[in-house]
Every structure is written in C-alpha cells, then in structure tokens.
C-alpha cells in the first residue's frame, strides 16, 4: 500500500511540475496565436516561479467559486504538457541542426579556400577511349619525382618520372575503395613507342600518354587524374602531425631506420619510406607495399579523432596537399567534397590495397630489367573493374 501511495504522489508531483513548465511557456508565448507577440518586461525565471506560486495560493483559497469553467480550463491545461514538451524538443533539435549546418558550411568553405591545386592542361588522350563504368569512378594517381633530370635507373626516361602509379577504383555501391598499385617497371605497350616500362610513358608524353597507356592496359576509362610530387608526401605527413605505417621488414634508408611492425613517421621519414627500393631483395615489390602502407596511414590519420576534432589540422592537410597537387579540370574541390560525402560510411578497413598481377621479371633487348605483367589475371581484373565486382576478384586472386 505504501509503495502505491508513494508512486501516486510521485506521479502527481511530476504532473504538477509539467503543468508549471507548460504554464511558464504558455505565459511567455501570450499573443502568438493571433500572429502578434505582446511581451511584458523580462523577469528572471525565479521571479516568474514565485509570482505563479503566489497566484496559485490566492486562487486556492477561492477554489470553490471557480465552478465548471475553471475545471475545464485545468483539464485543457493538463492536456498540453506533452505537446509543449514535444514542440520544445523539436524546436531545440532544429536549432541544433541549424547551428551544425552553419558550422559545417563555414568549415567546408574554409577547406575550399585552402584547396588550390593546379589544373592539368589536356590530361586525357584524344581518339577512342574505353566507355565509362556505370556508377563507378576510376581515378589515376600519379606520384611524380622531379628531383633531377638524370636517368639513374637506366630506364631511358629522362626528365620527370612517374615513380608511383595507383588506380583508385570507387565502385557504384560506394561500399569500399580499391587502391591498386601498378609497378613502375611493368613492361607494357606504350602507344606510339612500342613496349617499355610503364613509367616511361610519363617522360615521353606526360599525363595524357600515361592515362592512355593505363586505359589500353586495363581497358577501363580513367575518369579523373591527380598528380602529386613526392615532396608533397612529406607535407601531408607533417600536416597530420605524423603518420603510423606498418612495415613488413626492418630496413635503413636515407639516414632513417625502420623496424618491422609499426613506425611513427614525420615528413622526412615518410619520404624515405615511400621512395626506397634498393634495400629490398624484391626491389619494387616491397616498395609498392610500403607506398600502400603509407596511404593507409594517411587515411587512418585523416579519420582519427584528433584530426576530425581539429578543423585547423584538416585545413593544413588540404593546403599542404594541394601545394604539390595537379588535377584534371573536373576534379574540383566541390567534386571531391561530394565524393567524400558519398563515402561517409566507410571505415579505414574499407580501403582495399593490392598490386596489379605480375608474372616474374625479364631483361629487354637493350638491357633493361623489367617486371612482366600477368596478362590472364589482368584480363579478369579488367572485367571486374568494369562490372563493379572487385570483391569477388580479390577473393579469387589473394595477395
């Protein structure tokens, strides 16, 4: 019995409190039903409560004189607390959403101002090209290295070289991003030049010939191109406050020591990590794996709480990247924001990295060491890229 009595008293108290809150809101909104608002001089919340409390005490002494109309008013008032609370909550949510939208708009505007990439003139080849892949995006990432005009690797490619080639494939369902490395020494057909290492295409014909070579190799259309100088890797790393990469092996490069497992890198160390190839018995094979590890480290750094809660760090990253970045005219900041929004549900583990299939190595007639392409596996890869079926292809071709 005592428990039921206590519960009843608690309910009555809660109802009285709700009624008082509703009355406070109703009094503040007097006149709104007619489209006008009449406000009394502002009073503090405690003043309003004391005023209403004294009013209720006086009306309590004359309660018997109120009659039926008084009871109806009380009944109508008792029906309002839930509605008022609901409207109040909805109004609060709308206000919060509006504030967040304004903040997000200001933040995105800041990113757009920070983005200042150069535009590549005529990045795509003329003539026949593969048809676009329905709903998907294929973005060719070119890491060029313009440190010197010599030919230290004997690849007959004077001038700047495309030391890194990656294809970012965003499938139509946007459930993952596939990042495929194309080894720089892959022996392929370069249109107009016969067979050669694929990185020679960049030296002979710049971005357009590189795009044409990759399109001929994979039989897929390249929708966008982004070229970044290797020096930009250092800036990207420092803008994030460093990145963590996983190395399969311990090695030394350019004055830096790397251990097997996790390595915390600053900009200079990151540059050494992605450039090194001579420290490994399999040369470029480990090099491209390290470049993939670096890209995963960048993604992890970008989506970390420390970065997402620090708009200045994100802007620094965008600014540092765009300083060394050149893109096709269609890859605008707005396009990248839209693409990023379409991928908002992805996690770092949804970035799938792999290498275009190879089939050992060889030596050309003029003495160049090259990497042979696994033509059969590349044909099935091409089909998977065109049909948005990369998940199955990777399951059938594990690396």
Image: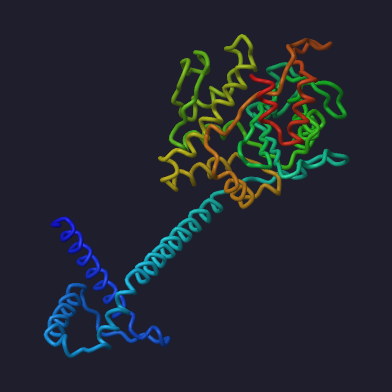
Q: Is residue 263 left or right of residue 277?
A: left
Q: Nearer the viewer, residue 209 or 395?
A: 395
Q: Is residue 113 above or below residue 158?
A: below
Classify residue 25 as left or right of residue 204. Answer: left
For the N terminus, the image quarter is bottom left
Q: Count the marks: how many?
A: 0
Residue 107, horizontal then vertical, whole percent: 48, 54
Q: Nearer the viewer, residue 74 or 211?
A: 74
Report if residue 179 is visible in the image: yes
Residue 279 rendering spot, x and y as whole percentages: 57, 12
Q: In this view, does 360 lie to the left or right of 301?
A: right
- Work out whether residue 116 can be spotted: no
- Quarter residue 353 falls in: top right
Residue found farthest to the front: 1
- Image position of 162 with respect to 118: above or below: above
Q: Give coordinates of residue 351: x percent, y percent.
A: 58, 33
Residue drawn at x 70%, y 41% as measured from the top left: 137
Residue at the image point whose x is 46% and y is 37% from the top? 240
Q: Nearer the viewer, residue 366 or 291?
A: 291
Quadrant of the image containing the C terminus:
top right
Q: Which percent across, then down, holds residue 108?
A: 52, 54
The colour scheme applied to this rendered structure is rainbow
Q: In this view, does 22 lie above or below 286?
A: below
Q: Which residue is drawn at 42% across and 45% down?
A: 310
């Amino acid at each position: 019995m005592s428990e039921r009595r206590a519960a009843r008293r608690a309910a009555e108290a809660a109802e009285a409190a709700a009624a008082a809150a509703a009355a406070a809101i109703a009094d503040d909104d007097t006149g709104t039903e007619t489209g006008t608002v009449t406000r009394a001089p502002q009073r503090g919340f405690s003043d309003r409560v004391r005023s209403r409390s004294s009013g209720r005490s006086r009306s309590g002494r004359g309660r018997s004189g109120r009659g039926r109309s008084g009871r109806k008013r009380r009944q109508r008032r008792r029906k309002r607390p839930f509605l008022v609370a609901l409207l109040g909550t909805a109004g609060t949510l709308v206000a919060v959403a509006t504030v967040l939208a304004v903040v997000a708009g200001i933040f995105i505007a800041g990113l757009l101002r920070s983005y200042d990439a150069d535009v590549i003139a005529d990045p795509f080849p003329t003539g026949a090209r593969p048809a676009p892949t329905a709903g998907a995006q294929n973005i060719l990432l070119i890491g060029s290295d313009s440190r010197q005009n010599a030919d230290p690797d004997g690849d007959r490619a004077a001038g700047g070289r495309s030391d890194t080639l990656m294809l970012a494939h965003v499938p139509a369902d946007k459930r993952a991003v596939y990042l495929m490395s194309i080894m720089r020494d892959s022996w392929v057909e370069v249109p107009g030049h016969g067979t050669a290492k694929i990185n020679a295409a960049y030296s002979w014909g710049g971005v357009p010939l590189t795009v044409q070579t990759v399109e001929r190799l994979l039989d897929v259309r390249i929708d966008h191109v982004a070229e970044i100088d290797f020096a930009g890797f250092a800036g990207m790393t420092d803008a994030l406050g460093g990145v963590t990469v996983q190395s399969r092996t311990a090695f030394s490069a350019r004055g830096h020591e790397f251990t097997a497992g996790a390595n915390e890198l600053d900009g200079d160390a990151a540059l050494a990590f992605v450039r090194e190839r001579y420290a490994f018995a399999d040369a470029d094979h480990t090099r491209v794996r390290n470049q993939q590890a670096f890209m995963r480290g960048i993604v992890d750094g970008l989506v970390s709480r420390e970065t997402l809660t620090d708009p200045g760090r994100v802007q620094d990253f965008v600014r540092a990247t765009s300083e060394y970045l050149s893109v096709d005219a269609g890859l605008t900041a707005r396009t990248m924001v839209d693409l990023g929004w379409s991928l908002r549900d992805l996690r770092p583990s949804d970035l799938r990295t792999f290498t275009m299939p190879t089939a050992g190595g060889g030596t050309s007639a003029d003495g160049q060491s090259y990497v042979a392409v696994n033509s059969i596996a590349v044909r099935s890869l091409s089909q998977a890229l065109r049909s948005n079926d990369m998940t199955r292809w990777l399951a059938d071709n594990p690396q």
